[in-house]
Amino acid sequence: MPERFSPSLQQKIEDRLRYYEDLGIQLFYKDRSANGGAAESEEATAPVAACSRSAVFEEPALPKSMPKAAPVKLAASLPPIVAPPAGPSLFEEKVADDTLPKIREDLGDCTRCKLHKGRNKLVFGDGNPKARLVFVGEGPGADEDMQGLPFVGRAGKLLTQMIVAMGLERRDVYICNVVKCRPPQNRAPEPDEVETCSPYLLRQIDVIHPKVIVCLGAVAAKTLLNTTRGISNFRGEWLDWRGYKLMATYHPAYLLRNPPAKADVWKDLQKVMAELGLALPKKSKS
Ligand code: SF4
């Protein structure tokens, strides 16, 4: 890496190149492993790199031209969002003068569902309250439960790499989950827990009013879309959800287990980048 870059810029460039490398894209730095690879922060990237480098990646097909933002596909075949059977219908009715602090205050030391019993810290969400891009995950894991912040474990580090690869930083986006307390043994949230907690997620989204929502994984996608269809049926497609453009893609934790799927996620994220007007990677001249 040339000396003329500041250390912080150099780190950002290395992070971005490293993510491209994890995706199997090796168009920009053919000599990096010989020259600078040993200087990488193993603490931050070793688990991801260990998975991906052992896998046989096919280089993902880069777009032949700058992808245009696809027209919004109405999710006509998806069932409508259904309001929860009890309590105020926050799915349909907006709270007047709502704000993120107000939603957090309303949650308080929440005991509305059984997930509170094993909770260390409630994980409300984190990021830019005026973000144009919101990532929605499933629920907190062990690291998130300890820190009270979303996506700070291994999967979170990968998500951060994905965000940096898009040309953004974590503080540019907002990250939250369907349920705000850690399910025991990292199991998937159960329907009653999702039903109880998700109205607060919907309030968060309405307050932030992003241009794009990216659902990370099946639980988030199925919750927001209220569908039982497998995520592979609509992953990477633009869907209209309550007036927002929504795309579902794989959860970073799934990518840690299945590194080849990173190529699919990278394609999805490039659609998001195009929609947000972010610079896309240039295609190879080879
Ligand atoms: S998961 Fe949501 S509804 Fe359940 S206790 Fe935590 S904050 Fe309350």
Image: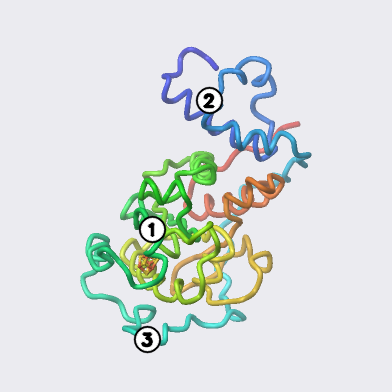
The quadrant in which the C terminus is found is top right
Instruction: Give the residue displayed 53% in from the left and 74% down from the top.
Output: 225
Q: Residue at x 72, y 44 (%)?
A: 60
Q: Distance between the residues labelled 1 and 2?
A: 31 Å
Q: Splitting the image into 4 quarters, where does residue 108 fall?
A: bottom left
Instruction: Identify whether 261 is placed above or below 208.
Output: above
Rendered view: 22 above or below 216: above
Kind of residue indicated by mark 2 = Ser
Residue 79 position in % (x across, y down): 56, 82
SS at circle 2: loop
- Label 2 crowd bin: few (<14), some (14–19), many (20+), radius 10 Å: few
Position in image of residue 187 (x %, y %): 55, 61
Q: Circle 1 is placed at which residue position?
A: 119
Instruction: Specify whether tag 1 is near ligand 1 (CB below 8 Å).
Output: yes
The spot of residue 213 in percent (x, y) is 47, 61
Question: In the rendered structure, are the residues bearing label 3 and label 2 in contact, judged by CB atoms less than 8 Å apart?
Answer: no
Q: Quadrant of residue 237?
A: bottom right
Q: Name the foreground residue: 73 vs 181.
A: 181
Q: Name the residue under label 3.
A: 86
- What residue is pinned by disc 2? 41
